[in-house]
């Protein structure tokens, strides 16, 4: 049996008529930048996240970058980020002109460990970026408490956590602002790149919108040195279709994850941990194995696709070699980079496929 790591085949076949209709509607209107679909998606996505404002931007990296810019964070400032995440989290800080300060993560949740944050805070620290990695929220109460003591912003990197819950509240409503990606593989994915920022701060939302539109909130009047980062009108129309199905798809992902959690029993495989306060949305189902290369090869020989998120810790990437970090500075992040393996999990995955993966893992 051939089981891909991921596929859009089943998801997109279910909604093809609605997607086609949305395209035709947008096409026939002849308005392709920041029109009615854009305005409607911003409202609907903000409502989904339980906040007052949503701002569509070009991609997830821009969502963080523009939020930092709107918070006046830049040259000479520091922003604390987790040591285990996709590099875009750190790059956004760098693009804003600030310095990313890496913080060790929790080996069970994979998220930033609040126990290690305060030791990193200096007079230059302006914000903490809490990444909700793989679909489970970070320990937000503790992070927010630390931020309040030190007068810091809290930005949620929610690129992998559309619809995730923390103590009943939706990811995107927990910090001062949240950044989302709509990269096609996300739980809410566009048919191309896209991103958004959610917040309850009207002033912040207006500034992010202006910064992403050449620094202008009024045509040809440029208050800021902005950039061009706008969520396309067509993508908004398509995302509106998908947003209506997101809760249904989340439930499907959760059912698949439960079957993995209940079915995989191999001492060589460490399963992900779900915390009591969190409602995991399983953007990725990530296990750990000290023999990852052997396991990945074994699964591949059985026709099972896998992926590694992420094989090199950010502080060990060539892009950040200038920061002077060395091997051993973040042992948990470095160990995760050597042991994590993402299993197949996609909408439309059958019980037969799920149990094939389970059986293969148990027989390794």
Image (cartoon, rainbow, N blue to C red):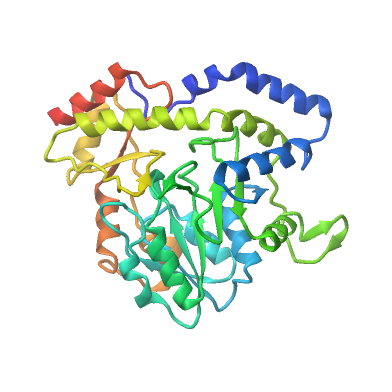
Q: Nearer the viewer, residue 303 or 210?
A: 210
Residue 156 picture location, percent across and down:
49, 56
Q: Is residue 178 left or right of residue 85?
A: right
Instruction: Count the labels in the image.
Output: 0
Q: Looking at the image, which residue sits at the far bottom? A: 123
Residue 305 in sight in this render: no
Q: Residue at x 80, y 59 (%)?
A: 216
Can you tell which quarter of the image residue 138 is in?
bottom left
Residue 248 picture location, percent across and down:
47, 27
Residue 79 picture location, percent across and down:
49, 69
Can you tell which quarter of the image residue 97 is in?
bottom right
Asked if residue 33 is positioned above or below residue 336 in the image, the reply reads: above
Asked if residue 151 is positioned above or below residue 238 in the image, the reply reads: below
Q: Looking at the image, which residue sits at the far front? A: 168
Q: Residue at x 78, y 37 (%)?
A: 36
Q: Residue at x 47, y 72 (%)?
A: 148
Q: Is residue 58 left or right of residue 89?
A: right
């Amino acid at each position: 049996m051939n089981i891909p790591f991921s596929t859009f085949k089943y998801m997109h076949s279910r909604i093809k008529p609605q997607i086609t209709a949305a395209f035709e509607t947008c096409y026939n209107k002849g308005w392709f930048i920041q029109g009615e679909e854009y305005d409607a998606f911003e409202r609907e996505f903000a409502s989904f996240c339980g906040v007052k404002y949503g701002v569509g931007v070009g991609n997830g990296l821009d969502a963080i970058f523009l939020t930092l810019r709107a918070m006046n964070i830049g040259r000479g400032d520091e922003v604390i980020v987790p040591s285990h995440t996709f590099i875009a989290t750190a790059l956004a800080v760098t693009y804003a002109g600030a310095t990313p300060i890496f913080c060790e993560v929790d080996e069970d949740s994979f998220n930033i460990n609040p126990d290690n944050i305060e030791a990193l805070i200096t007079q230059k620290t302006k914000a903490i970026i809490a990444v909700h990695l793989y679909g489970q929220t970070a320990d937000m109460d503790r992070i927010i408490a630390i931020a309040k003591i030190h007068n810091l912003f809290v930005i949620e990197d929610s690129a992998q956590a559309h619809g995730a819950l923390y103590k009943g509240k939706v990811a995107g409503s927990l910090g001062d602002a949240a950044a989302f990606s709509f990269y096609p593989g996300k739980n809410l994915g566009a048919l191309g790149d896209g991103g958004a920022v959610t917040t309850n701060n009207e002033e912040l939302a207006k500034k992010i919108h202006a910064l992403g539109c050449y620094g202008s909130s009024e045509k040809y009047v440029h208050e800021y040195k902005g950039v061009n980062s706008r969520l396309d009108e067509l993508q908004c129309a398509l995302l509106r279709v998908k947003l209506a199905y997101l809760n249904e798809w989340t439930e499907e992902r959760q059912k698949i994850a439960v079957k993995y959690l209940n079915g995989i029993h191999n001492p060589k495989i460490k399963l992900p941990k779900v915390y009591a306060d969190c409602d995991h949305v399983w953007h990725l189902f990530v296990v750990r194995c000290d023999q990852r290369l052997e396991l990945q090869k074994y699964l591949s020989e059985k026709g099972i696709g896998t992926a590694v998120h992420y094989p090199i810790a950010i502080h060990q990437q060539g892009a950040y070699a200038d920061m002077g970090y060395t091997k051993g500075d973040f042992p948990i992040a470095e160990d995760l980079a050597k042991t994590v393996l993402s299993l197949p999990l996609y909408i439309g995955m059958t019980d037969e496929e799920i149990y094939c993966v389970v059986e293969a893992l148990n027989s390794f």
